[in-house]
Amino acid sequence: MTSKAKPLIEIQDVWKTYTMGDNKVHALRGLNLTVYKGEFLAVMGPSGSGKSTAMNMIGVLDRPTTGSIKLDGKDISKFSESGLATLRGKKIGFIFQKFNLINTLSAKENIMLPLIFQGVNAVERERRANELLKLVELEDRQNHKPSELSGGQQQRVAIARALAVNPEVILADEPTGNLDSKTGGTVMDFLKKLHKENGTTIVMVTHDEDTAKVAERVEVLRDGQIIPKSK
């Protein structure tokens, strides 16, 4: 990633503090992180490092206690909850460890779901879903429900769903966590291809060092802070 790359997400001196009875727990302690347009970034960290909270901040799912988060140069602290939801829906595609597919919907219907929320008409929803099913090589499984798909197939449906609204960034939370190593490798190969051929910005949160190596840049989180790289 060159120095000329445009910042897409800027997290500046972000603290996130939770009050638990008389105690205050600092999940993030002055987090600073910039995600550049077109890069593949992995954020690594052990359990309790603040990864989940950092993911919520990167994905604009939560507000910081202090500090600022900018998405495309816009400070989200100035947005209402409905405004944040609209922003997320248009800018960010989410891929989750547990897939989070709707069990009563087919693969194709799961992919079309975010398009419904964005008010896209039925013809365009159908066209886009067919295009994405072809991209993830699941045209022959389009009418299958999640319970009729393998773990790898479910994750590919989840990837297609994340791409449905042409988001500026894909946020992948432990995308191989529920997959065996071979299937996980296939999913990571697909994400690499997506990044290389489409220039999609990808941010992946993971605890696995081998998975993180796929990314262009790796940042390590510990005790709610990014660990400075040794020179």
Image (spheres, rainbow, N blue to C red):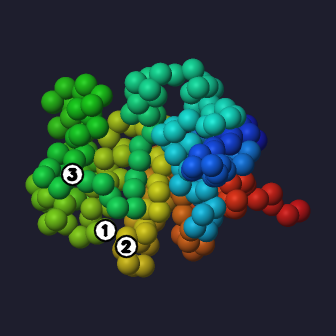
Q: Nearer the viewer, mark 1 or mark 2?
A: 2
Q: Residue at x 72, y 48 (%)?
A: 29
Circle 2 residues within 10 Å: few <14, some 14–19, many ≥20: some
Residue 7 appears in which quarter of the rendering? top right
Q: Is residue 162 left or right of residue 221?
A: left
- Disc 1 marks a residue whose amino acid type is Gly
Q: CA distance from mark 1 to mark 2?
A: 7 Å
Disc nearer the start of the sequence (1/2): 1
Q: Position of residue 130 (x, y in %)?
A: 20, 45
Can residue 153 be seen by looking at this rendering? yes
Determine whether 173 is above or below 129 in the image: below
Residue 190 appears in which quarter of the rendering? bottom left
Disc nearer the start of the sequence (2/3): 3
Label of residue 10 in the image: none
- Disc 3 marks a residue whose amino acid type is Ile
Q: Residue at x 43, y 69 (%)?
A: 177
Label of residue 102 in the image: 3
Q: Nearer the viewer, mark 3 or mark 1?
A: 3
Q: CA distance from mark 3 to mark 1?
A: 16 Å
- Disc 2 marks a residue whose amino acid type is Leu
Q: Position of residue 91 (x, y in %)?
A: 46, 34
Total tally of numbered discs in the picture: 3
Q: Which residue is mark 2?
A: 179
What secondary structure is marked by label 3?
A: loop
Q: Which residue is mark 1?
A: 152
Contact, mark 2 vs mark 3 (Cβ under 8 Å): no
What secondary structure is marked by label 2?
A: loop
The quadrant of the picture occupied by the C terminus is bottom right
Contact, mark 1 vs mark 2 (Cβ under 8 Å): yes
**Residue furthest front as drawn:** 22
Residue 101 appears in which quarter of the rendering? bottom left
